[in-house]
Image: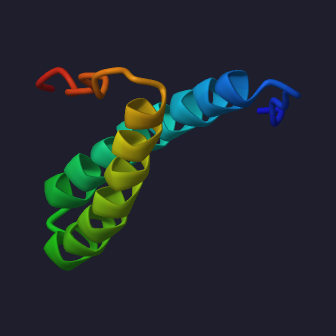
Amino acid sequence: MPVLTSAEAEEMLRFDLNNENETVRHYRRRVRQCEALGEFAMAEHIRQILIDEQEHQIDLATALGEDVPDLALPEE
């Protein structure tokens, strides 16, 4: 996926938030996959990374004056 850039600060924040949203979705899927495989320790490591990514997501949404997007995964 290409890296999007802009001279406009708000637009760059939007690009960053969209990327964080996608990253959070991916990490949530990986946690579920690890648990399904019985890899509980790996799932915990990924959860720690997910916490950091969600903090970035919150910071970006706050900077844009928005609520944090609801990225709950549907039950599989």
- Quadrant (top left/top right/bottom left/bottom right) for the C terminus: top left
Q: Nearer the viewer, residue 7 or 2?
A: 7
Q: Quadrant of residue 16?
A: top right
Q: Residue at x 73, y 30 (%)?
A: 9
At a point 27% along the width and 74% down the height, the residue shown is: 42
Q: Residue at x 81, y 36 (%)?
A: 3
> Is the N terminus in the top left, top right, bottom left or bottom right quadrant?
top right
Residue 59 position, x and y percent, is 40, 45
User: Residue drawn at (88%, 28%), measured in percent from left and top?
Assistant: 7
By what rule are the colours in the image chosen? rainbow
Question: How many numbered circles are shown?
Answer: 0
Q: Position of residue 38 (x, y in %)?
A: 14, 66
Residue 32: x %, y % from top left: 21, 48
Q: Is residue 52 left or right of residue 19?
A: left
Residue 72 vs 32, above or below: the answer is above
Q: Is residue 39 above or below residue 64?
A: below
x, y percentage for residue 66? 36, 20
Residue extending furthest toward the bottom: 41
Residue 73 found in image quarter: top left
> Which residue occupies the foreground of this view, 17 or 26?
17
